[in-house]
């Protein structure tokens, strides 16, 4: 068996302000898995993603990360677009850093913009986009370079249900063809269950993983499954776990 | 950033020219682009350029007040000449003043270019390493606070060409605001965007070009606005101390000549030219700021 | 006691000695004057202060400034010419082929201060064949001159040679401009024409007291004057001041020519006219451009004031 | 903003003092606040203050190189004195230099204070109306580009006190960077926050105090960093041109005296004092920037 | 009958870039109503809110707004906090502008921070908050001054389900006691139905209101209603309207 792609053992993260965001976190993600992370607002989900991306250093504990050369895609919780660059240039950035010219990147970017519904806005500047459009540009950017690990922090929160479902399906299709590992933060139990193989539920801050729900449904998953009782039951299990996590007294 | 801009962008640019009317609440009825080209369209367009005629008007009013003051208080011309006398002198000496002006302009823009390049490059170097910054910044400050007059002998000894000496002195005066502002600007990049570049493993050079420099642009341009005037005054002061009469001479020589020969109207004519040049340079950088920040930075929107 | 302010054109030095003498030995007070001495400096332009009424008397280096004033309609006039000869000189390194004045125009570098560039340098060009290509600015620092043996520079014959000797440890070649046709008076006292008209008595007292001051400075005990000068300009040393005084005397800067008979401050309008005509020839002025009657007045000088003081101090007739 | 800060905030401030070590990736084992007070704690704390010893070291190295150059190339002392000669002169003239230094310092900080106040107030006025800004900005530029030497006589005629004249001249030199930067800063406020203030119908004064001024702070501080050096050099240059009369004299007089006497070591001793003062002022403003921006602005985090 | 608080007739909004965000929009909100606005991402919902707040001027059409003195609360789609001020000071702002001192404001602010779950973070700076916490601070700010009209642009999108439901109930309670008018933008059909009296569904950009669903359920509404078939049916009606709106060909 190959070693896990991500492995965190007894991780603490205390910020300079003194806030302990994460305490004694244990996490284990295999290469190619699709894992969702759920938890109350402010519990440390974003912090975990940042730790996994290497953007923060743990205060304590051991963290094994993918090799430095591995391409990581990251959808930040805020759109994080360069305000001086057009949507096209923003999406181009990861490829550009990797040495790909505008011409060679054009097809891929056009396709991606199409699928996030931003065709016609390639030349718009971020300040001229709606909130959801910014987020979609940011999603396109994370996918433009075939990632080995895709970290997404509530990517679809600002989108309407229909766009959201379409992008859920697109994401699953990309994941299945791309074979990347996906760590997905969301507040939607339905989304977490629909997308992932495992749903991890975090406790209140200082956050740690308190429960894990396995979703047995094989891929490809279709919208039809959303109406099945299996789906509803799994969602209910996650919701209950979430409720337990929220009411758990701080250890 | 993008070579081909859609027509929408062009429209925005057009619009962006006029910062005042955009702030006004437009009545709905006027919002549809209208006003076909009438004979007086050019004139009306000029009227809409508040950034041109408001300052011009203010300067004219000030000039009239000055004229009035001089006449009313009977200030003798050798203390403070009236604008009419200054203009008469400007007209009478137009030839020599124009030559001098052109020489000063060349030094000013030469030094400004060097200051912009030098300041930005040095700032980029500082941004690449906090250690370099801490080690070298003191020297930049030393340059800024050393009076040219004091080191003029050294420059005269080691720099043969007068033009080179003038450029050097002017550069010393002008480069610091650009350096200091750009260093701050480079540090002001959005931390989230920094993280993004880290994540994509951008090289130092890529990070500098695509993240830090655009982030620093508003500060850099702010530095340019300061350095524009400073390099003009620097060119004049440099010529005071390191220039020589006779051959290539600029406005400083005209100022000094007029001063030593108590020709006050001519002195003020030269000062007037300097002032107008300063205003023009500032206006130029305002336009530059609008051009390169207009579409994305709050300061120009 | 009338309060008056007198501004010099430089920091205190021996060339201002007579005025400091009159100030500290009570001569001015004796003449009913409460005088404030205001120093000048290289970047300080005291000239506009006189017509503006901020000062009452101004010391000026040469007559060219006064010509310009008159030409430009400034109401000032020369009331006394304290120096018969201008100490303005060109200084060169010895043994570099600058033994004659004519050699100087071959120098590759001439370090000349800005105000000179716009005044007597023009005359040197027109009259003696100097060229602008030689010019480098002189900021009153000897470094560039000392560093270049081929360079020449301007100098006050009673000051710079002493400094050159101190710093460079050699005796420079000194060529006085006055010896080559630069016939201006120097260290002239300018006053406002209006004051000359309305308070001639006051002007007369200031001129007389200054003349007496100069005699006492040159021939009497100048210790107190030197002390006052060194207060204003702490960098001067007693030795330097004394050396300057020796040069003043040796070169006959103050007490020579007509001053010997008419007293210090002697002014001859014919000489003023002669100098003006030279400058016209050199192209600095157009003929008739300056009304010479407004340049200077002899109303206050040529009255043998102070000759008695000199006699008493020197013991000679 | 908030008078009572929780202990966390104090900890952050403490931490914020040291921008370098924060950027380093700390090994997990060190992240828990540790290091009990040992005898060498003070020494170690100094070692951690890179912002102090790195520049100091760089200056010392440069000084050694300079000494070496002067000795090796046998540069005569009247052209460029060796640091040892400069220090000897500094020591010999310590008394008069200290008095002069103190005088210059007073002018510098006086003018700087006026420049900061004047620049900020004027910028606030400009921010209150685009028309006022357009009408008055040209005059600010005129002030910036007019050489002090040229208008010094006018100032001396109309300003009686030498100190006032010096302050005025220095102010003219120093205020523009603050004005220009602050104006840009005031315009850089986040458009969304502007909307928020509009929505809550904030008065002009409230908008200025609670939105525009904090937004402009990074630019204002950047302007201060430039103006600090400029007002020092301005104080020196002003004294060159407007200050000779008085008994009170600053570094400029020492520089001039030394220059006339070709007492180059003393000249450089005075320049050294000026330089060190400039560096100290810059360092001061760096600390100020860290103090007032450290917790929220990218440039100091 | 009193005139409507907000009335828009044939409103167009074209931005300086040329984008037509809203076309021929008709809107009518009575004083005291709770109205939700739903629509695909980028359809012009935020633009409508900004028009109603007076932050944008319509390009065409007539718009009647509340009197200028009326206190308006606005939760922007992005948190829009002052980065240099603590959470307390940020929430204090509307009161401070109205002339209320820190001391007099303290109780109200503490209560509000408590109810959005930010107790203990009064002195934190925005950069030290998680995405959801920033949004909650921003919600507290909108409520701190008793508003006459409350505009909320996807206020709860960044929050977990449990916090979201709690805040939904809090919001309804405040609305019923405060008696203000509420215009609420959301992407959640469930939330829209749970909260409001009328749900307006917008079409694709250029946006206009294509359908209106009345929710008959009287207040107070409780979580129990969420499981009723009435609720589910109403949600389904809205979803279908939304689907129709999305597939509607541009007029
Ligand atoms: N300042 C602006 N300049 C130019 N175009 C703009 C501007 N603001 C919004 N738009 C455009 O107007 C349209 C509507 O934007 P708006 O923000 O109202 O959408 P929205 O319905 O709120 O979407 P979302 O659900 O994604 O927040 C979008 O196409 C957007 O590109
Ligand atoms: N840079 C920081 N400095 C100090 N504290 C921080 C910082 N970033 C986050 N925190 C704190 O860490 C805790 C966890 O934050 P995090 O952003 O990971 O939460 P989250 O689970 O992503 O919440 P949300 O669902 O609201 O996005 C919060 O209490 C927050 O206040
Ligand atoms: O006064 N000097 O010209 O030397
Ligand atoms: Mg988060
Ligand atoms: Mg929106």
Image: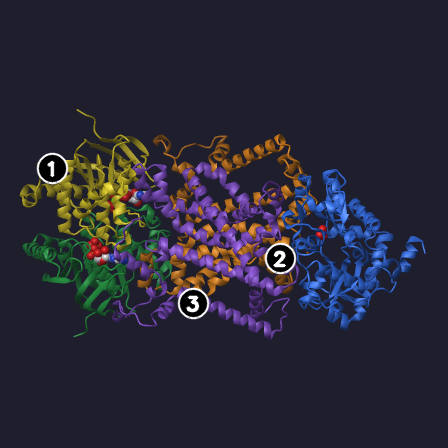
Chain colours: A yellow, B purple, C blue, D orange, E green
Mark 3 nearby-residue class (10 Å; few <14, some 14–19, many ≥20):
some
Q: State which chain disc 3 sits on.
A: B
Q: Which label sits on residue A215?
A: 1
Q: Are marks 2 and 1 in contact (CB under 8 Å)?
A: no
First in residue order: circle 2 vs circle 3: 3
- Residue D166 location (% of width, % of height): 61, 57
The reply to whether residue D279 is in sight is no
Q: CA distance from mark 2 to mark 1?
A: 87 Å
Q: State which chain disc 1 sits on.
A: A
Residue nearer the viewer, D112 or C249: C249
Q: Which label sits on residue B256?
A: 2
Query: Which quadrant holds the C terminus of chain D?
Result: top left
- Residue C50 location (% of width, % of height): 70, 64
The reply to whether residue C114 is in sight is yes
- What kind of element bears circle 1? loop
Q: CA distance from mark 1 to mark 3?
A: 70 Å
- What kind of element bears circle 3? helix
Q: Are marks 1 and 3 in contact (CB under 8 Å)?
A: no
Q: Toward which corner of the image does residue E8 lie, by quadrant? A: bottom left
- Residue C302 location (% of width, % of height): 85, 64
Q: Toward which corner of the image does residue A11 lie, by quadrant? A: top left
Residue nearer the viewer, B119 or C182: C182
Taking B299 as reference, is B118 left or right?
right
The residue under label 3 is: B53
Q: CA distance from mark 2 to mark 3?
A: 33 Å
Taking E139 as reference, is C263 left or right?
right
Q: Nearer the viewer, mark 1 or mark 3?
A: 3
Note whether C3 is above or below E228 in the view shown: below
């Amino acid at each position: 068996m190959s070693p896990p792609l991500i492995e965190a053992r007894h991780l603490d993260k205390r910020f300079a302000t003194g806030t302990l965001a994460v305490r004694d976190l244990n996490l284990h993600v295999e290469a190619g898995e699709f894992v969702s992370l759920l938890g109350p607002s402010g519990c440390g989900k974003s912090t975990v993603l940042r730790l996994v991306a290497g953007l923060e250093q743990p205060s304590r504990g051991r963290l094994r990360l993918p090799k430095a050369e591995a391409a990581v895609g990251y959808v930040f919780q805020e759109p994080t677009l360069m305000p001086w660059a057009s949507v096209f240039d923003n999406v181009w950035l990861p490829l550009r850093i990797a040495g790909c010219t505008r011409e060679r990147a054009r097809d891929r970017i056009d396709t991606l913009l199409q699928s996030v519904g931003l065709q016609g806005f390639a030349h718009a500047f971020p300040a001229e986009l709606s909130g959801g459009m910014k987020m979609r540009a940011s999603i396109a950017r994370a996918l433009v370079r075939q990632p080995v690990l895709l970290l997404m922090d509530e990517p679809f929160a600002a989108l309407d249900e229909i766009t959201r479902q379409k992008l859920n399906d697109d994401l699953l299709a990309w994941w299945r063809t791309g074979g990347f590992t996906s760590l997905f933060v969301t507040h939607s139990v339905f989304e977490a269950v629909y997308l992932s193989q495992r749903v991890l539920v975090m406790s209140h801050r200082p956050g740690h993983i308190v429960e894990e729900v396995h979703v047995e449904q094989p891929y490809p998953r279709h919208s039809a499954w959303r109406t099945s009782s299996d789906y509803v039951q799994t969602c209910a299990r996650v919701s209950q776990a979430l409720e337990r996590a929220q009411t758990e007294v701080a250890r | 950033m993008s070579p081909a801009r859609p027509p929408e962008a062009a429209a925005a640019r057009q619009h962006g020219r006029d910062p005042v009317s955009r702030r006004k609440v437009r009545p709905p009825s006027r919002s549809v682009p209208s006003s076909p080209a009438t004979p007086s369209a050019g004139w009306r367009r000029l009227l809409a350029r508040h950034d041109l005629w408001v300052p011009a008007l203010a300067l004219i009013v000030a000039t009239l007040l000055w004229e009035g003051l001089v006449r009313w208080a009977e200030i003798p011309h050798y203390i403070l000449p009236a604008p009419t006398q200054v203009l008469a002198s400007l007209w009478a000496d137009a030839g020599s003043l124009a030559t001098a002006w052109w020489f000063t302009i060349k030094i000013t823009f030469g030094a400004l270019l060097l200051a912009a390049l030098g300041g930005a490059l040095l700032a980029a170097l500082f941004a690449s390493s906090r250690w370099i910054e801490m080690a070298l910044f003191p020297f930049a400050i030393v340059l800024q606070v050393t009076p040219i007059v004091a080191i003029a002998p050294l420059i005269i000894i080691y720099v043969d060409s007068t033009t080179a000496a003038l450029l050097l002195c002017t550069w010393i005066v002008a480069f610091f605001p650009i350096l200091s502002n750009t260093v701050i600007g480079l540090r002001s990049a959005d931390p989230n965007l920094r993280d993004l570049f880290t994540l994509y493993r951008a090289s130092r050079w890529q990070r500098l070009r695509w993240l830090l420099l655009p982030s620093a642009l508003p500060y850099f341009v702010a530095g340019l606005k300061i350095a524009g005037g400073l390099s003009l005054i620097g060119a004049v002061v440099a010529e005071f101390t390191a220039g020589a009469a006779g051959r290539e001479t600029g406005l400083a020589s005209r100022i000094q000549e007029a001063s030593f020969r108590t020709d006050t109207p001519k002195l003020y004519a030269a000062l007037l030219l300097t002032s107008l040049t300063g205003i023009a340079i500032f206006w130029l950088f305002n336009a530059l700021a609008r051009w390169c920040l207009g579409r994305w930075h709050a300061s120009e929107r | 006691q009338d309060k008056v302010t007198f501004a010099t054109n430089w920091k205190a030095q021996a060339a201002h000695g007579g005025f400091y003498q009159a100030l500290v030995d009570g001569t001015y007070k004796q003449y009913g004057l409460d005088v404030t001495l205001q120093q000048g400096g290289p970047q300080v332009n005291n000239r506009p202060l006189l017509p503006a009424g901020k000062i009452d008397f101004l010391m000026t280096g040469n007559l060219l400034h006064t010509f310009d004033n008159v030409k430009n309609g400034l109401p000032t006039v020369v009331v006394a010419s304290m120096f018969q000869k201008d100490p303005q000189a060109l200084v060169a390194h010895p043994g570099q082929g600058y033994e004659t004045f004519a050699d100087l125009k071959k120098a590759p570098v001439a370090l000349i201060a800005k105000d000179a560039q716009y005044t007597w340098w023009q005359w040197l060009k027109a009259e003696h064949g100097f060229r602008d290509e030689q010019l480098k600015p002189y900021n009153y620092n000897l470094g560039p001159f000392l560093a270049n043996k081929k360079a020449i520079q301007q100098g006050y014959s009673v000051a710079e040679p002493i400094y050159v000797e101190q710093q460079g440890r050699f005796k420079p070649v000194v060529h006085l401009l006055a010896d080559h046709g630069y016939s201006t008076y120097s260290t002239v006292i300018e006053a406002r024409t209006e004051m000359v008209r309305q308070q001639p008595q006051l002007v007369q007292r200031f001129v007389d007291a200054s003349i007496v001051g100069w005699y006492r400075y040159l021939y009497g005990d100048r210790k107190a004057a030197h002390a006052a000068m060194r207060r204003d300009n702490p960098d001067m040393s007693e030795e330097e001041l004394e050396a300057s005084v020796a040069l003043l005397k040796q070169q006959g800067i103050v007490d020579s020519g007509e001053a010997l008979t008419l007293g210090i401050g002697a002014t001859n309008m014919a000489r003023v006219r002669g100098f003006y005509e030279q400058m016209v020839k050199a192209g600095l002025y157009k003929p008739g451009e300056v009304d010479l009657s407004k340049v200077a007045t002899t109303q206050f000088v040529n009255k043998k004031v102070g000759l008695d003081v000199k006699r008493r101090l020197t013991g000679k007739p």
